[in-house]
Amino acid sequence: MLFRRDLRLADNPALSAACASHERVLPVYVHAPEEEGDFPPGAASRWWLHHSLTALDRSLRDRQAGLHVVRGPTLEALLSLVAGSGASAVYWNRLYEPAAIARDTRLKSALQAQGIEVHSHNAALWCEPWRIATRQGEPYRVFTPYWRTLRPQLAADAPLPAPALGGWSELPGTLPLAALGLLPDRPWDNGLAATWTPGEAGAGELLDVFADDALAHYAQGRDLPARHGTSRMSPHLHFGEISPRQIHHALERHNQSASARADLEPYLRELGWREFAHHLLFHFPDTPTTNFNPRIGDQLWVAPDEAALARWQRGRTGIPLVDAGMRELWQTGWMHNRVRMIVASFLTKNLRQHWRHGARWFWDTLVDADLANNTMGWQWVAGCGADAAPYFRVFNPVTQALRFDPQARYLSRWLPELADAPPALQHEPWKDPALLKRSGYPAPMVDLGQSRQHALAAYQRLKG
């Protein structure tokens, strides 16, 4: 059983199928980041992966098994393991990024040529990308009709239980997880460790908290960055520590009344956006580097400004909501979704830096960095993606903060130098030069109104 981003035992179709068909199953993880194409895991993802693999190995050992860890290349590693164990088949769950699809196609062909059975399954999505199409047989490019097609197909079926693992015996040559070098050389990860519990058990605990405390207020609470009004399940979903089916089933069981089920719909729709992102990436594999909408040309953005990018990355732009979001990201490996849209709009429109610069930074710093979702989100905000926000929609960080963080609780948490100021000044500290001088908080690097007008003028020139 080849584990990749399906690091759980329950509701794991490939693992269940392997255990049902064979007396002995060898759980394997092959470390081969060079096979990820242009997008090997970033630093935050590697941190999460180390701890998720640790949790998976612990769960397996509790069942008298364990995780056999080896280095890639994957094909050579699997052939060696098959020869050493006498295995007759290899099982895995499918991945949907372009590099993963190409690799798995090669793996399947090469293994079958050696007389080895290959069985692949879907463990990550409600519905795989090729199973939904328009009436014309084309991929969807707009979310609402996609969701209208997908939603009736969702049934809160009972997830698969964790299977019994019989007859496992460790082969020589397994590596300790520390040998993979996933953790940072210098300890910058204290904030991540204080915020997250990677692994299948951590995913289940967080889902319970969401079901008990936040789901009933999700429609309103999801927009308030100072509250834990979202599920924060995204990293657990990305690493396959929990499945959409498990989440759907658990929340349906937790919310039996008609009104409670109505509260669930906005959250299911957000999970639908995750499915749509994978649908887009599968059908349009160039979008991680190329504008989805070819009418939106790269001339909308100016040449890379390293100094401006550095200030944005470090949360030193002088725009409080942007800086709070970027500092939350650096400290915790995560950022509230509304704030993600605001910091992305500021970078791509007020600073007019290409969305690819932001996508790369998110890729390295987010614990939930996911190629499909990261690409869709950045292109959506930049105005060049599928179902995109129109380019002339430029989020105003001040009005957004006043609306969704009126008491400046989120700002106070991440901008401690401004925390003693009244909320009105935390939202616009440049109105009190003495506050800037006293606190050391920077003046705005751009004028929000003027930079918005420059962005719109560039868009008008592009339209001709």
Image (spheres, rainbow, N blue to C red):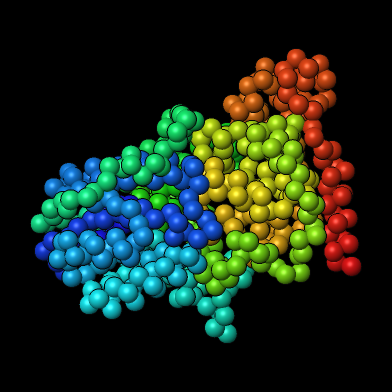
Residue 207 versus residue 37 in the image, above or below: above
Can residue 77 be seen at all in this image of the molecule?
Answer: yes
Can residue 126 be seen at all in this image of the molecule?
Answer: no
Q: Image point 87% across, 61% down: which residue?
A: 460
Query: How far across and down, in percent of the image, does residue 381 sit?
Result: 68, 54
Q: Image point 58% across, 46% down: which residue?
A: 362
The quadrant the N terminus occupies is bottom left
Is residue 398 left or right of 19 when viewed as pictured?
right
How many labels were placed on the picture?
0
- 385 and 339: which is toward the camera: 385
- 263 and 289: which is toward the camera: 289
Is residue 224 left or right of 260 when viewed as pictured?
right
Query: How far across and down, in percent of the image, does residue 457 sit?
Result: 88, 55
Q: Image point 71% across, 62% down: which residue?
A: 384
The quadrant the C terminus occupies is bottom right
Query: How far across and down, in percent of the image, does residue 17 sit?
Result: 22, 66
Q: Image point 67% across, 17% down: which residue?
A: 420
Residue closest to the far bottom: 136
